[in-house]
Each structure stands twice: as structure tokens, then as C-alpha cells.
Image: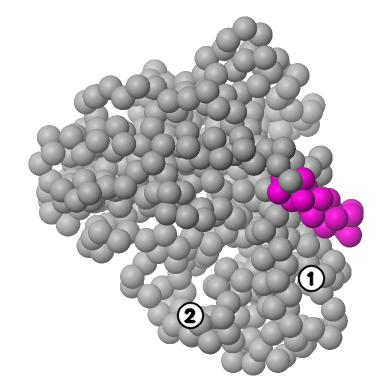
Amino acid sequence: MYKINDSQKFMYFADKSGAGQALLLCGSLLFPSRIDTQKLQDALNELFRINDGLRTVFIEKDEEVYQDCRPFERKEFEVKRFSNKQELDDWASVYATIPLKLDIHSEGSGVSKETWKSEKPSLSLVKNVVLHNTKMFFTKLSMGMLNREKACCEMIIVDLPETNGVIFKIHHVVGDAWAIMLIANQLMKILDGKEVKAFSFKQLAEKEDTYIGSDRHSRDIAYMKSEYEKCPEATWLWPEHYTSLEATRRTVILDEDLTSQIMDYCKINNVSPFTLFQAAICIYMRKRLKRNLFYVGSVALNRNDFQEKNTVSMFVTSSPVLIEMEDDFSFADLLNHVRLKSIGIMRHHRGAEKNADSKKMLYDIWVSYQNAKLDEDVEVDAAQYYCNYSIDTTIFTIEDRSSKGKLKLHFDHNIKVPESDVDELFDIVISTIKRCITNQDIKISEL
């Protein structure tokens, strides 16, 4: 058994508090030509055999939570038939909102409620969550999913008239966006009869045990503590209380010309699209907050070597990047500032989770960059489906997965965020980038 890390702990206890719907990652793959169903059954079983993280169980013991994995057992995956792609997408958009039930066991005293229960929520939030859960009961009933088996990952074979494929759903406590693409690539390699590299999450858990209590651990905590002390004021763009956990996703697809300009600018200036968009979001935040000192959440992939990049597990951590802007900054100055601050946080971000001042208190906007791609077959039709629930206010994601040369921007937000604010955010971010990649010497005070 291995202790879950701090990011996992946040998600695990959020799930126990009834917010499991917010912790789902769901996607589908449709193949360019039909694959024999038995071959697909064999491939999915092989996927579960080589990735023990997909078989994770949780053990509560003496106020701690541990993880281990079930022994591999071959299973028969459900086959669900659809008359067309639209019918699949309609069904999947609902399926993606149905929580998974984690496999949890208690030993001895287990974990007391006082360890994880939330502070007393508002009456309106309780009422809306109860109404939502009632609707979810009838949704699960109508889809025949009231008594699904306990699992942190679920896969279903989907069959259409012209093709077939797989839809999969993973709990965020055991997987991240990279893991989703890793699984997809592994599946296609297995189907092609190619060698697949996969590693046990246990080896990484042992690394974490070595890190805790080390000198590096202490230095990381000290660095993050010094950052917190520079700005004790939290950054909340939408400070109103939650009245619901319901959320929605807005997606904007940039055209090929703008995407090409962005990529060329990043290459010439030796910055990533993540840094460019984060700087543009800082322009929006400065305007909204009317101050130059604030935090922006940075979602770090945290996969540093070959082994980690080929392990199905939850690596992502989110950390506060403290932005210290000056009125006379040019956009180029801001971009360099964001880059250097991000590098510092990347080096020490593991100390953020250990500090009493948690991410939830410091900021309500996260920025994420996803660039893992399907590398085995560009003809595969891949889709993702949003869970429509949120325990964090907003996440702005730059998705750079396609070989077709178009960046996708997703903004996932709690329904307390007005749609007018979402319009404004996209307008400012995109217009800032258009303007600044042609004139990076422009002063931020002029934007």
C-alpha cells in the first residue's frame, strides 16, 4: 500500500463529499475501419493488464488513505450500439456526467468524517446539490447505470453501422489528461501488434515516499512560503459564494492562420503557447482586478522522464504563480516575467501542496496546456466530453492536440460566472495575442 499524494487527497475527499461528478475525464475513439469485436475485447483486457493504475483500490486506515491495485482479471466489456455518430455523442455527453464509484475499503479505524467533511455550506448550495443529485438518480436509472461495479476506470465498446470504437471514463484521482492520451495511444499500438511501454504506478509512489522529508522537500516548502508572504491577498475574480456545483464549457477554435502565427511567434521568441496565453490572461486579470499583484493558477503536467510519461497515474498539480507586473512593462517584459515566474514555480511546485495556504484560498482561475497527441493513427476520430460539474471556479485550457493546425481553447466555469464575463475573457485574450505577436513592445498600460 502507498499513501495517496496531496493532489489525489484533495480529489479523493471531494469525491467522498459528493462531488465525484466534477472529477471525471471522458473521451471516445472511433476507428477509420471496423475492428473485430473480439480483437477489441482482447486489446482492452491487455490495456488493463499492463496498467495497474486502472485497477486502483483505496484503503482507509488510521486516518490515512492508501492506494493499491487489484490483481488483473480478464473481463468481458460491454458493447453498446448506436445508429450514428450524433446518437453516440448525445449519449456520451450524458454518460460523461455520471460519477464513478471508487473501490474503497476500511481497515481498523478508517478515516473519520471530521477529516474530510466540508465547512457548513450555504443553504442554497445544499438545496441545489440535493436537486442535482435527485436528477442524477433518474438519469442513471434511465441509462441503466444505477448499479455499476466499483471502478476508477470504465470502458465500453461502441458499435456504429460503419465503424466501432471505445468510450472510456476515468476518475481524476488516478488519471489526468496526459493519461487519457497515453491510454489511447497504447490501445492503438496493441491493436497494431506493436510493443507497448507501460510502468507501474507503485514505482512512482515509492519516489514520492523518498521525496517526503528530504532536503528538496524542505526547500520547496520554503520557496512557496516566501511567495505566499509577498502577496497575502487572495485572487478571486468571481468572489460570490457558490450556489451550485453545476458548470459548463465554452470552446473556441482558432483558425489555421492565427494558430500558425502563434506557433511561429513562440518558436522565434523561445516561449511555449502556454506562457503566451498565460500572459494574455494576466492582461485580462489586471483589467478586472485593477491591480498589478495577483496569483494565477498554473496546472503543471509534472511528467519529467520516459517512465513517468508512460505511466497511467495522476501527476498533475496546480500551483499559484505570483505575478508582479509594472505599469511600464511592455508585453515582451510581461511574457519574460511570466516565463521566469513559471520556471521558479515548476522547480518548487511540490511545496505548494504542503503549505497551509492551499490553492483554493489563493485563486479561482487555472491555466492548463495540453499537447499530448494521438501518434499512432491520425485518422482516428477522437472526442472528449465534459462532466458539467466543478469544485473549482474556472479552468482555461489550451488544447494543442490536432495535426490539423488549429488550437482549441476551452473555458470550464461554474455557473456563477456570467456568460458576459466569459465573452469578455475570450475577447481580451484573443485580441491581446493578435495585437502583441505583431508588436510585442506595446506597453501593457495601452492594452
The structure residue drawn at horizontal position 81% and vertical position 50%, both measured from the top left corner, is: 222
SS class, disc 1: helix
Disc number at residue 192? none
Q: Circle 2 is placed at which residue position?
A: 263
Q: Main secondary structure of the magenta part?
A: helix
- Neighbor class of circle 1 (other Cα within 10 Å; few <14, some 14-19, many 20+) is some
The residue sitting at 18% across, 39% down in the picture is 40
**Which residue is painted at 73% across and 75% down in the image?**
337
Instruction: Verify CB contact (< 8 Å) between mark 2 and mark 1.
Output: no
Q: Which residues are magenta?
A: 216-233
Please say whether residue 19 is visible from this viewpoint: no
For this view, does 193 lie left or right of residue 447? left
Which quarter of the figure is the C terminus placed in?
bottom right
Assess whether residue 341 is covered by the magenta stretch: no
State whether residue 96 is above or below residue 294.
Answer: above
Q: Which residue is mark 1?
A: 286
From the top left corner, tell me how far across and down residue 10 is, in percent.
Answer: 65, 35
User: Amino acid type of disc 2?
Assistant: Met
Residue 58 locus on image (x, y percent): 52, 23
